[in-house]
Amino acid sequence: MSNPRVPAPGDSPRRTHDGAPRASRATVAARPREETASIRSEHEAADRALRESEERFRTLVESANDAIFIWDAEGRCLEANRAACERLGYSRAELLTMTAADVSAPEQAQLVTERMAEIVAHGSAFVETVHWARDGTRIPVEVSTTVTSLGGRPVFLSIARDITKRKHAEAEAAVAEARLVEQTALLQSVLDSSEAAVFAVDRETMWALYGVEIEPGRSLLDYEHASGDDVGAKRNLDRALAGERFTDEGLSGDDERTRAWFEVTHAPVRDRAGMVVGASVFTRDTTARHRADDEIRATQTLLNQTQEMAQIGGWMYEPATRTVTWTDEVYRIHDLSRDAYEPNSATRDIAFYAPADQARIDEAFRLAVSAGQPYDIELRLVTAQGRAIWVRTSGRPEIHDGQVVRILGDIQDITERKLAEEEIRGFNAELEGRVIQRTIALEAANRELEAFSYSVSHDLRAPLRSIDAFSQILLNEYAAPLDAEGRRILGIILRNVKQMGALIDDLLAFSRVTRKELDRRHVDMAGLARSVAEELQVAQPDREIVFDIGPLADAPGDAPLLRQVWVNLLGNAVKFSLPVEAPRVEVRSDQSDGEYRYTVRDNGVGFDPTYVDKLFVPFSRLHPTAQFEGTGIGLAIVARIVGRHGGRVWADGTPGNGATFGFALPTRMEAA
Amino acid sequence: MSASPIEILLVEDNPDDVELTLRALREHNLANRVKVVSDGVEALEYLRPDDAQNPPADGLPKLVLLDLKLPRVGGIEVLRRLKASERTRKIPVVVMTSSREESDLVASYQYGANSYIVKPVDFEQFMHAVGVLGLYWLLLNEVPT
């Protein structure tokens, strides 16, 4: 690299003379010249002395380690020593063509003129500047400049000392200082951002080395004393100063509200050689952590107690760590203690389930972990103490970003419920069995009843027929041997046979009403009543009977059975009205309270209401047979039919003043 | 009984009813060729509905009066067997019974009974009924030969 400040060609360096320093010449020139021999010899001696002096001086200057320059008033170099040449990398001849600005670093060059004026004003100056060597090396220098006179002209004598090493050291020190400041600030900010209180004390003085709470010059012990535990504090500091590092926890405050927890760490402070020079105390307020711990403990206690009361255990599985956590109740359900067992869902936990159920829980758990599929199943389990119980266990996977991160589950002893269920199942089975038995018994009874009816129908009728027939034959073919009394008696026999035949027929009719399946339909009651009335009218051609049948509500029911109701009620009305002058039968209906009500009112002989309860009892009669024919089954059949429809019957009457019979049918047919 | 073919087979176990029936038939001059059997087994042995090779010695009757409630084999079963056989199915069968049971009535017609008569308790009605049905089935009704 070329040095821009190498003098350009043709720019010949200025030379004063053959190389002798101008200063010595100036000194020489100052002396008067004498022409005498003695003087000459004196001169010679003086010259010799001068040369010697000059020689010594030159040696002194040339051997100096500092660069020495002589500049003229314009800053041109008049002289430079060897040190100057070597340091700047120029020959003496070259330097003598250069100025003070030429050897200065660029930023210093412009200050040269100003400084020279200052030096002139004060006679001397001491400045730090930077020289610039030929190869571009910056050389920090300390320059001492004095104004002096040479040959009547003012010149500047500069002695420049190379302070590169000092500057390096200074720079390094500055960097180190800056780093220290930075690190200190960093440390300070770290400590400030921490909620911990930090002290450091000096071993000898026990004065604080660090710690905002301690005023400079006061011992930490003063503060410890104020807190009333200086003995303990001193002992702790002594332990740290002995090289021990330890952490204690302490409690302050008198009541629950002001109570505070502290965690105090004492540690030795060592220098670079490892010698203990002090102790540090690191105090952290752990009240919040303690309170949080207390709260967690309280919550856990509450959870465990709640689970104990509810007999529901909770568990958690974390696939990442394959860890299982059980609440107390889970241990209780398994008859395990927390110390004796560590849950491990993959293998050991499943072994508690009944062998037949292990595949199910294994599959459910595997699907929960791999596919996030929840489960809720009931299984048999054998506890650590060998109790066979039923449990219901469920697992609910928690999924984040498509990953199962956790499975929360519960487990509950449902043995009692299961037993109750089994008991209920037992009851039900027993009940069902009983129903079946009853049904069988009922069916048997029905069959017996049918067989009975059949017997009544067939077997009772046959002897009656024989009695009737042979009595009749006797009456017809053997009338002659019989007298009037005999014939009268045969008549009584025959009349009773007929009555018994009628009774049998009615009994069978009554039985059929009970056994017949109801065929429920919409029934036109007015139509039924009218057709029955017409038949009755036809059967009594010699009597005028007035039937007044109003509009009647239709009802749901079995038409043939309801027709029988009308036959019996209207027939009764006619039968008991025949003795009166103008028989009249009124039929009406209305609707209220979810039922249709029908009434049949006649103006016949009526009845004594005292015996109204007997009216609907089979074969009970309020009138003698001689007066009114009948077996006493008609109203019983009415009551039975209406009853099977879910309805009710009633009667109202007074002797000689007609009777009213009524029945009501539910508007909605219920299962009979 | 004579060698002449019988006209009525009366299947009845009650001797009183047999006597009354015969009396009623006699009243109408229909009692000459009546064969009486007292239960279903005897009826089937006589009619042999399942044995085409050996017809009854006295020939097949023109009418069967069949009670239902019979010892051993009941009337319904006799009816079923008669109507199931090619040889005997054309013989009119009149069920004469004391039963008013709907089930008996339905079963009788289901197996092909030609009439169903409930024996009246009243003697005169009984005489009348037997007379009418005898006249009808023996004298008025035409049967394929």
Image (tube, coloured by chain):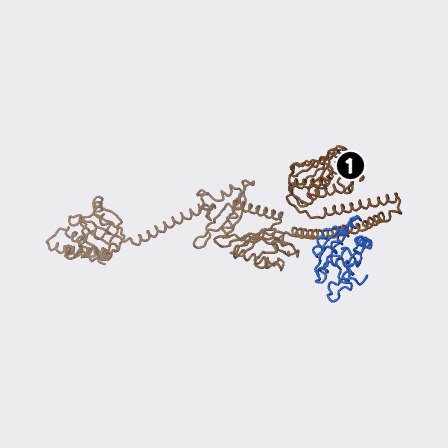
In the image: residue A144, left or right of residue A186: left
The part of the image, by quadrant, that contains residue B42 is: bottom right
* The hue in which chain B appears in the rendered picture of the protein: blue
Count of number-bearing discs: 1
Q: Name the image quarter holding the C terminus of chain A.
A: top right
Q: Name the image quarter holding the N terminus of chain A.
A: bottom left
- Quick check: can you spot residue A609? no
- The x and y percentages for residue A554 are 64, 40
Which chain does the numbered disc 1 sit on? A
Of the pair B45 and A386, the residue shown nearer to us? B45
Of the pair B76 and A399, the residue shown nearer to us? B76
> In the displayed image of the protein, which residue is found farthest to the left?
A35
In the image: residue A576, left or right of residue A243: right
- Quick check: can you spot residue A216? yes
* The hue in which chain A appears in the rendered picture of the protein: brown
In the picture shown, does residue A428 fall above or below A566?
below
Mark 1 sits on what residue? A611
- The x and y percentages for residue B144 are 70, 60
> In the displayed image of the protein, which residue is found farthest to the bottom?
B53
In the image: residue A127, left or right of residue A599: left
Q: Amino acid at mark 1?
A: Tyr
The part of the image, by quadrant, that contains residue A548 is: top right
- The x and y percentages for residue B118 are 75, 51
Label 1 CA crowd tier, 10 Å (few <14, some 14–19, many 20+): few
Of the pair A340 and A449, the residue shown nearer to us? A449
In the image: residue A150, left or right of residue A582: left
Secondary structure of residue under mark 1: helix
In the picture shown, does residue A47 fall above or below A579?
below
The part of the image, by quadrant, that contains residue A37 is: bottom left
- The x and y percentages for residue A602 are 72, 35
